Image (cartoon, rainbow, N blue to C red):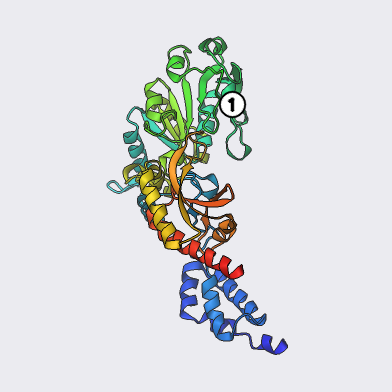
């Protein structure tokens, strides 16, 4: 053992490999040295020959200088929170690459003076929702609602239905968020029923606004009653702020019950807050749309600086709004027959036990709860779930009735070959192990 340790290839000689020199410039010296050290340890353990050490170090290098790994989303959930929600379009990725360097994000090239930050994204947002007098972007949907509340309702009351005091992701609750920035909540109605008279009776001189929160991650059914934005706007005498949640900017034929920004503003909402990813399919950010004077007031509030988005987000948002349909939009419009044909082709390439089956997907990301999206999947033995998840390119499906389903709803067609290669490797390893 001592002799073998003495024979370990020297670090400087391994690092001289052209592939590792190139990787050091791309990934950084620390990551490359870590991979070399791991390969040397494998040599000392007898797993590698001296000649194999550079190859093993190269093979262990990540594709990029981050621990994040690209994943094939075969769960059937279009906007999967654990997988980063909305994947960016190719146009948005290209825009991020442009924004990564020095840009004119706050420079007017014509005058050489300071320019309006994010003007491209804001112009695209206003064009997408012409019913909005103005628009502003912050770092997420919760931040948009927090900024509205802090600017308009600090030390004042916000009237909201009890059934709309929702909990959003990771245990965060809307009422706690509003109270944290200084608002006093005045709850009206009951969990399942609220009437217009409940709102009008609660509004007084201390009321800053009436808040409508779309319960985007659950459904209340049965003996229920609610009041729409149009009724409220015509009766309460104070601004109506609508948190629509999912980022849908216009009505969607497959999601008729999901509120959208344009319709909500036309119904009389003073301000609309929404997410910029989820159903919009862009980067994570929060959108503020509505009355121009109020939006300008929010933009100039001191706390707005703490919620400012960076140039990468602005670039990705603009490209999402002006470019081709992003992956989320494409998935929502997917033809079930085309998905089944793809599943059949993948199953045929793999052979038994793979089989193409019809399946049902979901929107996810706290949007359109209860809506089922017709889809298709490749069915495999349930025991392949972990090997596929841990493969060179992770493929994440879901187990249902003792079988693994690789649902194609959120898988772009160009990734079908990746699914085939990953499943083939997992099936081969299972045969060898069995």
Locate the N terminus and report the quarter of the image it occupies: bottom right
**At x 50% / y 61%, what residue is drawn?**
423
Q: Which residue sits furthest bottom?
A: 3
Looking at the rendered image, the quarter that the C terminus falls into is bottom right
Q: Quadrant of residue 168?
A: top right
Residue sitting at the far right:
2
Q: Residues within 10 Å of mark 1 (few under 14, many from 20)?
A: some
Horizontal and vertical percent for residue 195? 53, 13
Q: Which residue is mark 1?
A: 165
Q: Quadrant of residue 98?
A: bottom left
Is residue 13 positioned above or below 146 on the image? below
- Image coordinates of residue 307 in percent, x first then y, are 51, 40
Residue nearest the observer in this picture, 34 or 293: 34
| Residue placed most toward the observer, 342 or 157 | 342
Tell which residue pokes out farthest to the left in this image: 110
Residue 410 image position (x, y, % from top left):
44, 48
Residue drawn at point x = 44 percent, y = 33 percent: 299
């Amino acid at each position: 053992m001592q002799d073998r340790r003495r024979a370990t290839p020297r670090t400087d000689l391994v690092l001289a490999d052209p592939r590792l020199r190139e990787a050091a410039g791309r990934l950084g010296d620390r990551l490359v040295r870590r991979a070399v050290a791991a390969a040397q340890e494998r040599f000392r353990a007898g797993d590698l020959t001296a000649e194999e050490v550079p190859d093993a170090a190269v093979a262990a290098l990540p594709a990029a200088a981050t621990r994040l790994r690209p994943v094939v989303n075969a769960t059937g959930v279009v906007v999967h929170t654990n997988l980063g929600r909305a994947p960016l379009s190719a146009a948005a990725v290209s825009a991020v690459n442009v924004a990564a360097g020095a840009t004119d994000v706050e420079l007017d090239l014509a005058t050489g003076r300071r320019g309006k930050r994010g003007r491209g994204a804001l112009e695209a947002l206003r064009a997408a929702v012409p019913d909005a007098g103005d628009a502003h972007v912050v770092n997420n949907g919760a931040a948009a609602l927090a900024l509205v509340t802090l600017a308009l309702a600090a030390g004042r009351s916000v009237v909201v239905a009890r059934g709309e005091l929702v909990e959003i992701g990771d245990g965060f609750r809307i009422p706690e968020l509003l109270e944290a920035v200084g608002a006093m909540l005045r709850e009206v109605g009951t969990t399942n029923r609220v009437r217009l008279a409940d709102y009008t009776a609660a509004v007084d001189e201390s009321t800053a606004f009436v808040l409508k929160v779309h319960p985007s991650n659950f459904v209340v059914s049965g003996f229920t009653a609610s009041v729409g934005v149009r009724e409220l706007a015509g009766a309460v005498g104070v601004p109506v702020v609508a948190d629509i949640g999912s980022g849908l900017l216009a009505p969607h034929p497959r999601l008729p019950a999901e509120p959208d920004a344009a319709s909500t503003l036309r119904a009389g909402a003073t301000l609309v807050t929404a997410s910029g990813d989820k159903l919009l399919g862009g980067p994570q950010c929060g959108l503020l749309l509505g009355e121009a004077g109020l939006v300008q007031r929010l933009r100039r509030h001191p706390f707005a600086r703490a919620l400012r988005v960076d140039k990468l987000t602005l670039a990705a948002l603009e490209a999402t709004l002006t470019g081709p349909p992003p992956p989320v939009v494409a998935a929502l419009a997917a033809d079930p027959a085309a998905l089944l044909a793809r599943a059949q082709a993948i199953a045929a390439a793999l052979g038994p036990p793979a089989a193409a089956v019809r399946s049902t997907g979901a929107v996810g990301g706290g949007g359109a709860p209860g809506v089922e999206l017709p889809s298709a999947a490749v069915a495999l033995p349930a025991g392949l779930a972990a090997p596929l998840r841990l493969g060179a390119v992770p493929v994440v499906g879901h187990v249902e009735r003792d079988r693994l389903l690789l649902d194609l709803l959120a898988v772009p067609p160009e990734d079908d070959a990746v699914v085939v290669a990953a499943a083939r490797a997992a099936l081969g390893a299972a045969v060898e192990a069995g």
